[in-house]
Image (cartoon, grey):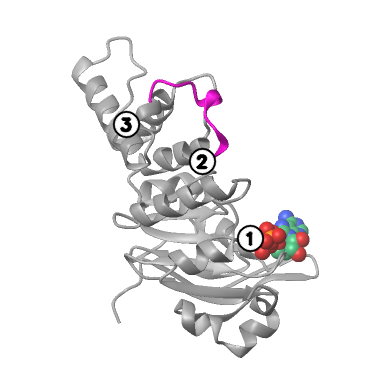
Amino acid sequence: MADALLDVRQLSRRFAALDALKEVDFRVEAGEIHALIGPNGAGKTTFIHHVSGALQPDSGSVHFAGRDVTKLAMHQRVAAGMARSYQITNVFLGLSALDNVALAVQGRSDAGSSFRFWRPVRREKALFDEARTYLEQVGLHAKSGALAGTLSHGEQRALELAMALATRPQLLLLDEPMAGTGPEESARMVDLIEHLARHVTILLVEHDMNAVFRLADRISVLVNGQLICTGTPDEVKNDASVRRAYLGDHL
Ligand SMILES: Nc1ncnc2c1ncn2[C@@H]1O[C@H](COP(=O)(O)OP(=O)(O)OP(=O)(O)O)[C@@H](O)[C@H]1O
């Protein structure tokens, strides 16, 4: 089997007496949208924290693009090609959408810093041109001059995605991108994620089952810190243990 882009092996983490994650084996293949679902408190966010580097496991390992990244800090994982939409981004509400994305481009190590007295003008132009391409990819090009604080909630989430894309990730970690969005914005976000998935592998944690079953190539189900099933949407939907533990209520 080809190496997975993300390969998590036997990951365990306890919080006091609670097994938040128990010997989780989890793989994301390059090019797929892989959704992680499960009831409240199942350990999904804790798992994403271990993938992004915000938390360290008690045991087990995280391999990314063929490299053991278990001991790497978050910013090192971002530099290695892993982006987490809400965590690596800080939207500055008083700056324009374009300036926010330009800052994210600038923060990338290979883009160089223009916090210098003499800024090379050509580099500055390249930075803004690149930032515009990310705004276009998320459908925000018409709002590039708008202050981030004046954008709707859905547009701010799209802006966060543009800022995540500015790190040129191979893997995008999306933690509840539909949270707090209305039906219209949520439908737009589904379209946007579908569009982005042509260029980047996506690990999606989401409670909106319509969105998950529409978007995911494969779904993994976490219950009480244990992975009980991984498969295609149809396989997961028809799995008896999944129906018992979680999806029964949703279907
Ligand atoms: N820092 C912590 N200290 C102690 N317990 C924690 C900590 N973080 C999470 N937990 C516990 O670990 C379990 C898993 O929590 P987690 O937030 O990962 O679940 P989740 O699947 O993301 O839930 P939700 O869908 O509600 O966001 C919960 O019982 C939670 O209370």
Q: CA distance from mark 1 to mark 2?
A: 21 Å
Q: Position of residue 18 (x, y in %)?
A: 77, 70
In terms of secondary structure, where does tag 2 sit? Answer: helix
Occupied quadrant, residue 145 = top left
Check whether the beta carbons of the residues at disc 3 and disc 2 lie within 8 A of each other: no
245 inside magenta stretch: no
Left-right relation of 18 to 30: right
Left-right relation of 156 to 99: right
Left-right relation of 53 to 67: right
Occupied quadrant, residue 97 = top left
Type of the residue with mark 2: Arg
Q: Residues within 10 Å of mark 2 (few under 14, many from 20)?
A: many
Mark number displayed over residue 46: 1
Between 80 and 5, which is closer to the camera in this rendering? Answer: 5
Q: CA distance from mark 3 to mark 2?
A: 16 Å
The answer to whether residue 108 is visible is yes
Q: Position of residue 234 (x, y in %)?
A: 47, 81
Label 1 beta carbon less than 8 Å to ligand 1 = yes
Task: Residue at 55%, 33% (x, y): give it.
Answer: 152
Q: Position of residue 105 (x, y in %)?
A: 35, 33
Q: Residues within 10 Å of mark 1 (few under 14, many from 20)?
A: some
Please give the range of residues in magenta. Answer: 144-154
149 inside magenta stretch: yes
Residue at which label 2 appears: 157
Quarter holding the C terminus is bottom right
Between 76 and 222, which is closer to the camera in this rendering? Answer: 222
Residue at which label 3 appears: 131
Q: Residue furthest bottom?
A: 240
Between 181 and 159, which is closer to the camera in this rendering? Answer: 181
